[in-house]
Image: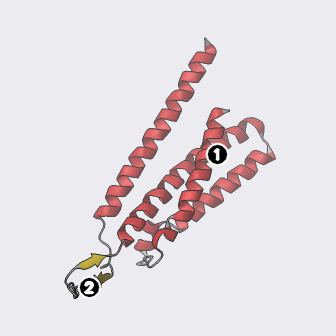
Amino acid sequence: MENSIKYSGRKFKITLLFLIIIAVSLFTTLWTLTTSYPPLPTRAAPPNNFGIGNGQIVIRSDFEIFYVAHSVVSTVNMVLLIALLVIFIEVYKKTKSEFSFGLIIFGFAFLLKDIASSPFLASIFSFYASGLGPFIVLPDMFELAALSVLLYLNLKY
């Protein structure tokens, strides 16, 4: 009986965490899309085989897509790190293990890194990324994968 209560409490926490991550992702996406940014670079479409085009069609840069993706993924990483920090602190309180304390320092350092590299913080100080294309979001996606595995393993055991 006690195990089923403990399992249902864990299931509730996992569901709540995923709902929070989804809500944060949606909020971040909407906020990023509605925030005004400086004008993005445009380039004229190259002429086709018949010489038609002559710059009449303007192709917007795909900068917005990568910037929104970077904002969302970096914010989700921060939520995952906060969840991991809460778990690591609870484990440290129970065990007083040096390894758990090291995990707290590890999580806190990554959280500070994500806060410092957040597009929202950069935009507050009028800095904007440009010309990086998909390379602006790839490191955060790798970090998201690693943090997801780490959170899954911590919640499983």
The relative height of residue 148 versus residue 52 in the rendered view (above or below) is above
Residue 126, x across and y down, in percent: 40, 78
**Which residue sits at x=57%, y=18%?**
5
Residue at mark 1: 150
Residue at mark 2: 47
Q: Please tell me which of labels 1 and 2 falls first in the chain.
A: 2
Residue 60, x across and y down, in percent: 30, 75
Q: Amino acid at mark 2?
A: Pro
Nearer-the-camera pick, 92 or 60:
60
Question: What kind of element bears circle 2?
Answer: loop
* Image quarter hosting the C terminus: top right
The relative height of residue 150 versus residue 111 in the rendered view (above or below) is above
Nearer-the-camera pick, 21 or 50:
50
Residue 48, x across and y down, in percent: 26, 82
**Which residue sits at x=57%, y=64%?**
139
**Which residue sits at x=56%, y=53%?**
144
Residue closest to the far right = 98
User: Is the residue marked by circle 1 packed among few (<14), some (14-19), or many (20+) residues within 10 Å?
Assistant: some
Q: Amino acid at mark 1?
A: Leu
Nearer-the-camera pick, 66 or 81:
66
The relative height of residue 146 versus residue 138 in the rendered view (above or below) is above
